[in-house]
Image (cartoon, coloured by chain):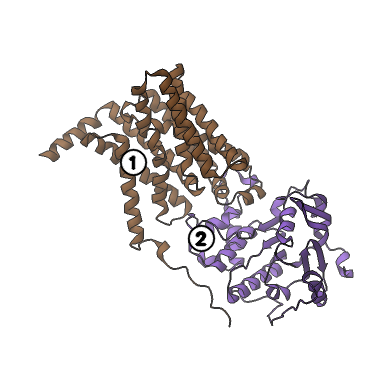
Amino acid sequence: MTSAYRTEGAEPILEIRDLNVVRGNETVIRNGNLRVIRGDYVGVVGPNGGGKTTLLQTIFNFIPKESGEILLFGKRTEQFNEWSRVAYTPQNAIHFDEQFPLTVRELVSLGRVRRSNMLRRLNKEDWNKVDDAMEAMSISHLSDRRIGQLSGGQKQRAFVAKSLSLDPDMLVLDEPTTGLDAGSLESFYKTLSNVQKRRNTTIVVVSHDLSAVFCRMTKMVCVNRRIYETDDLRDADGLLRKVYGEHFEFMKHEHECQGVFDDP
Amino acid sequence: MILESVFDDVFLLLGMSFFQRALVGGCVISMICAVIGLFVVLRKESMIGDSAAHISFGGIAVGLLLGIEPLLLAVVMSVAAVFGMDYMKKKIAQADSAMAVMLALGFSMGLIAIGLSDGFSIAIMDYLFGSILTISNSDLLLIAALGASVLSIIFMLLKEYIAMTFDESSSKLNGIPTGILSVIFNVMLAVTVVLSIKVVGVILVMALMVIPSLAALQLSLSFKRTLVAGISFAVVSTFIGIMLSAVVDLPAAGVIVFADFIMLMLLVAYKRLGHSEENRKPSKEKQPIP
């Protein structure tokens, strides 16, 4: 399934080998294998309860694994200590307490709060990165707005900006577009494409909205107990049938897919 | 004429050292409570201060019974209670029921201790309802030392505490030692509660923590401005409360907390009247593409 160009010289960002994850008495991930290289734009799909979120949480050590190996930048996650190189925006991140007194810029700056700058204030470089991240997500104009006042799409952008503020090599987003209307969703994914192109950030995105992600992906991953992956997107329909069943009909919509987009 | 005599009273009081101590002590305690309180409110654990205070009451009563320094025992038990609640929250129960259990436990210990001794029900009243006018110089020193340490710890770790309060798991991912910082915060919380007992008493401690922060939250400001607003409201209410209670000769604790409450009501009204930004409708993003 792996095409030739990927094996030569491409830097692996994430590798999963023979992963088994058990929750309660149930095996949620069985013998999972996955390889993500630098610059990949990975769309993760699969039925509800198929283990998408579990897979991500296992990568980030929030859930223990039963057996197998997970490597980030070639290091097993048990020994890995450069967590700032990977950013994770969990499902429902945007369902926070709307009363929480933070401006957008303050929220994004929380992304820069990390062990190495404990006990001192954020410096000029930190704030530059914060402003860059807001710029990349096209929310600079919302800088002083309270986060509770944002629309769903704006909240999502703010949280991705928070993740981007540390300049991660890989950005992992779990269901970032749940509840967004079609227009916000489309423009969100366009912005994300720009981030991937301009910053060469590897993106892994879990989404129900297959069609919006589909045309931008370099790799599709289906999770339903097992992990199926393909780099050949012409093969996507076959892969989806494997996961969802033979009767599955994939609706493709026309999207502007490639290239760098005008920022909204 | 009445006004004149009121002013005379006020100037007389301001010249007296016990009253000066009450003002300074009260305002410093209010400041610390407002800072700790904002985090407590945002963690949705408003009752934690109340539970710690009632456990302290148990500690004070047992201390009086056994002849151990009551406030010292109160600090020890209050710290233990805060950690107990933390543990229960993780392993046994929801946060709110954990707090309810601790509150009840503290008060029942106090009642048992009082019943066993039969001698100090007068002394215990001071702890129940506060005795701000009897703050001694050594009390004041203790309050100042606590105030300085709590405020400097919070401000040194401000961005970490904000990050943790907002989203603990992503803070952990960024390598912030959330476990240790929580322990530090819990100790500060417990000690603050015990020292506040001197000012407003066991029953009203949580008011000092919760009300000024809640009032500040009405203004929809940035985090730092909310913190500053909360501190200001707390200090102003306490100052007005102590002055007023002296002039009209009513219990200081009651008047302080009532002043806090009036302040909160004014701010809620201000918000309702639409002066705050929060009332603006969230701006829509670009219209959906048909």
Report whether mark 2 lies on the same chain as mark 1: no
Amino acid type at circle 2 is Ile
- The chain letter of the brown chain reads B
Instruction: Give the percent coordinates (x, y) of residue A194.
Output: 67, 71
Whether residue A34 is visible, yes or no, is yes
Residue at figure coordinates x 14%, y 35% from the top left: B5
Which residue in the protein does label 1 denote? B257
Q: Is residue B53 above or below residue B267?
A: above
Residue at 34%, 54% in the rendered image = B267
Asked whether residue A144 is in view, the answer is no
Q: Which chain is mark 1 on?
A: B
Q: Which residue does the image show at 31% across and 43% down from the upper left?
A: B258
Q: Amino acid at mark 1?
A: Val
Q: Label 2 vs label 1: CA separation?
A: 31 Å
Residue A147: mark: 2
Quadrant in the picture for the C terminus of chain A: bottom right
Viewport quadrant of the N terminus of chain A:
bottom right
Q: Secondary structure at mark 2?
A: helix
Left-right relation of A94 to B246: right
